[in-house]
Image (spheres, rainbow, N blue to C red):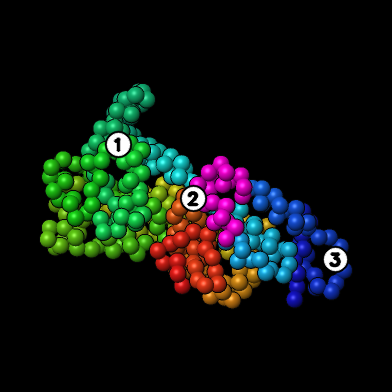
Amino acid sequence: MGRLFYLGSYVTMQSESSQMDFQYDFGIYINKCKQFIDIMISTRQWSGLTKPDVFRWLSNFKNLDYEDEEYIIYKLLTNIIYFSDSDIIYLLNNGVRNFLFNDIILKAQIATDFELDEKQIINIVNNEIAKTCFVPLLDSNSPHESGNYIIRLLVQNRIINPEQSVFLGNIEDTINFYDYKRIVVVDDCIGSGDQMITFFHGKALSNNTISLIEWAKQKNIEVIYLVLFGYKQTIDQLKNKFLNKLKIDCLRILDDNLRVFNDSYFYIWKDADEKDAAFSLLSKITKSNKISLYGHNNLDFAFIMDKTIPDWTLPIFWQKNKNWQNLLMRKNSYV
C-alpha cells in the first residue's frame, strides 16, 4: 500500500519498504492544531463546542496506525467552517438592516440623487422593519427547530419587536391586526431545499385551502424567504422554481469549492493526492464504524453554526452509535 509523505510543497507516493528521503513532521503540525483548537474554544470562536466535546470526538481515532492519518483528522477538524453565536447575530443584524431592504434604499437614493445621509437611511430601514412580519420556517410545535431559533435571536437582540414574530398558523389574524406589508420567512440553512418547498407549497392558510404564497398574493403582501446559509446549487434551483412568486435572499452562499472532497479545488487539502488520502482514510473509518461518509443529498461540507450542524455536513461530525462519538448532536444523530 502506498503512503503519502510531505515536506513543504514536496509530495511523493512511496512504498512502505522504500527509502524515505523526506518526511513532513506530522507531530509539529498536530501540536499546532491542538493549540489552535484550544484558542478557538477559549475565545468562543467555536462557541458551541467545549473541550470535552472535541476530546470525545477525537477519541474515535485513538487507534489510527500512522501519524499522517492523525494529521488528516486534525487538518479536517481545524478547517471546519464555523460561525459562532456572535457571527450569526452579526449576520442577522446586517442581513435585516443592510441586505433585506437594498432595493428600497436604492430607489430612495435614486429619487434624492444619492443625497441621503446615514441617519436618513437608518430611518428608512427602521420604517420598513416596522412594516414586516417574521415567520419561522417550521411551526410552533417544534420550538427547537432552526427557524424558531433565528426568530429568538432576532427578538433577543432587538433586531425586531416581539409582536413582529408569529407562527404560520396565526399569520392571517396578525396581518389583519398590524397591517404588515411583507412577510419574511426565516431559516438558518438550506441544503436540499426539501423542507422549504414543503413549507411554501403546503396548504396552510384559510382553513388549509391555500398556500402562504397564494394567500399573500390575494392580500398584495410581499413574501420573502430569508436564509442565513445555503448551498449555491440549491439556492439557484429554488430561485428558478419560485421565479416571480417568491423572493429568496441567502446571506452566505456555500459553493462546491468549499466541499471537503471537491476534485478540482482544495480548500482544506494541499492537493489532489492529499485529498485522495483523506477520502481513503475517512471512507475506511466511516465504513468500519457504520457511519455515512456523505451527508444529506450526497453533500460533504464541514460546516457548523454555533450549536447547530446541518445534515449536509459530513456525518462523521454528527452521527452517533455505540461505536462512534459525535462532535455535535442533531435530532437524527443516532444511526
Q: CA distance from mark 2 to mark 3?
A: 42 Å
Going from N to C along the chain, the mark reached first, 1 or 3, is 3
Q: Amino acid at mark 1?
A: Ile
Q: Amino acid at mark 2?
A: Gly
Q: Residues within 10 Å of mark 3 (few under 14, many from 20)?
A: few
Residue at x 30%, y 58% (from the top left corner):
142
Residue 165's x, y, as percent?
25, 45
Label 1–label 3 contact, CB within 8 A: no
Q: CA distance from mark 2 to mark 1?
A: 36 Å
Q: Amino acid at mark 3?
A: Met
Q: Which residues are magenta?
A: 37-56
Going from N to C along the chain, the mark reached first, 2 or 1, is 2
Residue at x 61%, y 63% (from the top left corner):
59
Left or right, 319 with reference to 17: left
Q: Which mark is residue 48?
A: 2
Left or right, 120 with reference to 70: left
Q: Which of 105/321 is in front?
A: 321
Q: Which residue is mark 1?
A: 104
Which part of the image, by quadrant, shows the N terminus?
Answer: bottom right
Residue 297's x, y, as percent?
44, 68
Residue 323's x, y, as percent?
55, 72
Q: Which residue is mark 3?
A: 20
Residue at x 35%, y 48% (from the top left corner):
150
Residue at x 53%, y 44% (from the top left corner):
44
Q: Secondary structure at mark 2?
A: loop
